[in-house]
Image: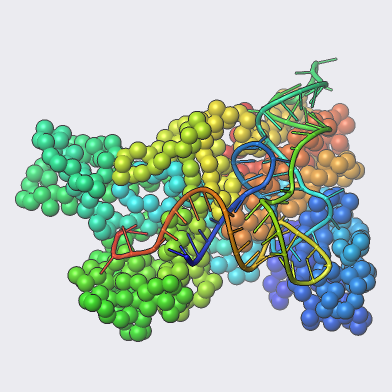
Amino acid sequence: MRTSRVRKGRQELNVNTKDTIAQIVKDALAGAAGEGIMAAAEAPPVKIEYPKEERFGDYATPFAMEAARVFRKSPFEIGTAIAKHIEKSSLVERVDVVKPGFINIFLSARYLCDVLQTVLAEKDSYGRNSRQAPRRINIEFVSANPTGPLNIVSARAAAIGDTLANLLEAAGDRVDREFYVNDFGNQVLLLGQSVLCRYREISGETVSFPVDGYHGAYVRDIAAHIRENFNAQVEALPSDDEKAGFMAVKAIEYNVSGQRHDLARFNVNFTTWFSERGLHESGAVAHTRDEMKARGLLYEEAGKTVFRSTDFGDDKDRVVVRDDGRPTYMLADIAYHRDKIARGYDLVIDIWGPDHHGYIARMAGAMKAFGYGEDAFRVLIAQQVNLVMEGELVKMSKRLGKFSTMSELLDEIGVDVARYFFIMRSIDSHLDFDLALAKKQSSENPVFYLQYAHARICSIFREAQKRDLGYEPSERDGAHYDNPEALALLKLLARFPEEIADAANACEPHRVTNYLLRLAQGYHRFYTEHRVLADDAVQRNSYMALCDGVRIVLKNGLGLLGVSAPERM
RNA sequence: GCGCCCGUAGCUCAGUCGGAUAGAGCAACAGCCUUCUAAGCUGUGGGUCGGGGGUUCGAUUCCCUCCGGGCGUGCCA
């Protein structure tokens, strides 16, 4: 963004308002230190906050209180010394030092007008930050077993992962989205056997179903699909095992394709679909075992090969090769993560379900064992989703075939509401998703509140066109923004880039929904108080420009969430 | 037993790295449309931030402990 520029080395960097304020405070601190008032070297970090009350300014720092002990001076004294060195620039209008020692900073009207100009100029790209050195990030999420359709838990992971990826990109990084397909192991065999049974049933045979088999109705669909398209190939196979193996391969193709389709409908598109089977077939799994052995990370015990994960923070050492020589899931997963790092990513993020949190220590241990830095690997646990129907909890289980699929959810409440609901809550909080309520109250949903603000603005522009009122953003006057509603909007527009950066750095997509809610609220208030299509042309242009800015930010913000910004409702 | 997440208004949840008088939506109540979309706005009521201790200028936030809810603690994936 263009709001301000700071020279750093020879490169010119775009910096958001908050970072700029932080720099101003740091410079002021250095200035005060230069006068011998305090030693800047020992200073605690400068935190910039948003005061709760308007009278405390637009940005504030509690620095003086925090530094009081170090500097052996009263917070107020420190605050005053720093405030004296904060130059009243085109950005800062006023600096107050209050009560214990808060330093409160007020943005200038001129700066806020500049921000609006930036929004209008940058349009779709407003809000994006740039980094001096963009990180290459791989974010792996959903990665549901290819043994059936995606359920609600996967839907939450999909919404969170995709939004986080959007945010990291907007924060200046390069991001790939990846889905790990677990197309290997016992479950694959079991799926094949389950399909084979249904296949036989269709042919009129009576067969006994595998005890732990997959009972979902979709298994019959797959059987029917195979019977229709691959009947001759199946019949040509001599043994049941081979038939089941063939079924498994086809069933996984069928399921993965279905998952891909459902996710695309949910606005989630993966860069890479990575096959676990491929890791085994390429020898990467065996190679990882050899590597671990060469590094002395393994020992043998009762015919099994065990990873010394306790040396790297795990509770317990973990078996990586069974006594029959078959590798465990974990060995493949280590190979997988090594592969990701080898592909050149600076940061590998995994989003897992709550049932995998016990797995973090051993995986992190493996990464550590291979010497990858702690900041190269991060696991986020997306807490569980309880599907509630009419106030009653609905249990989900793929095995039992009683589950509500993601695609059913989308049929019920639509993509926009689903994505928004999954994102609006912190990733750490359990989510009660009342399907009936989400559908019934859809017109009172927060997502509609946001979309309505956008549609209302679009409506104004349509009306202007209808009345043949031109819109000349250059012919505007900052004086028309001198009211509480307009000022509040301008300040919120200025905050958008830093909200993105903060949400991305904290890996907390839900912050964006909070921000957009405040923006929409600010707009609805403005709309109620002020007539945009005023008779006076300069006033009209000023207000239309403001509306246009809000529209752009709403659209960009909703875009990050994967939610549409309708022009009419 | 051990580990992770959660406990904030009637309900669902925000609350930034420890900051100023703890917020929003829904629900309840009272107002606001002859003019750009009322899916909106304004106002009112509603809280021992699960209990107790500690750390400090300051704790919903950090630490300890107890209580309650969920999940995990595989040679399944």
Q: Is residue A6 placed above or below A297 in the rendered structure?
A: above
Count every numbered label the image shows and give the total. 0
Q: Is residue A489 left or right of residue A561?
A: right
Give the quarter of the figure containing the N terminus of chain A.
bottom right
Please tell me which residue is depicted at 77% across the width and 63% down the height of the picture: A48
Which image quadrant is residue A225 in?
top left
Residue A484 % position (x, y): 86, 42
Q: In the displayed structure, would residue A203 be above or below residue A482?
A: above
* Quarter placement of the C terminus of chain A: top right
Q: For the point 64% across and 42% down, which residue is it?
A: A555
- In this picture the colour scheme is rainbow
Q: Nearer the viewer, residue A207 or A232?
A: A207
Is A22 left, or right, of A417 in this rendering? right
Image location of residue A133, percent across then percent down:
60, 70
Residue A172 or A105: which is nearer the viewer?
A105
Q: Could you tell me which residue is drawn at 91 percent across and 61 percent down?
A: A98
**In the image, what residue occupies the spot 32% across and 50% down?**
A146
* Viewer-nearest residue: A536 or A292: A292
Q: In the picture provided, is A153 more to the left or to the right than A300?
A: right
- Residue A34 image position (x, y, % from top left): 89, 81
A509 relative position to B15: left or right: left
Image coordinates for residue A116, horizontal then vertical, percent: 77, 48
Would you identify the image quadrant in which residue A328 lies? bottom left
Rendered view: A407 above or below A2: above
Residue B37, above or below A162: above
Residue A85 seen in render: no
Residue A129 seen in this snapshot:
yes
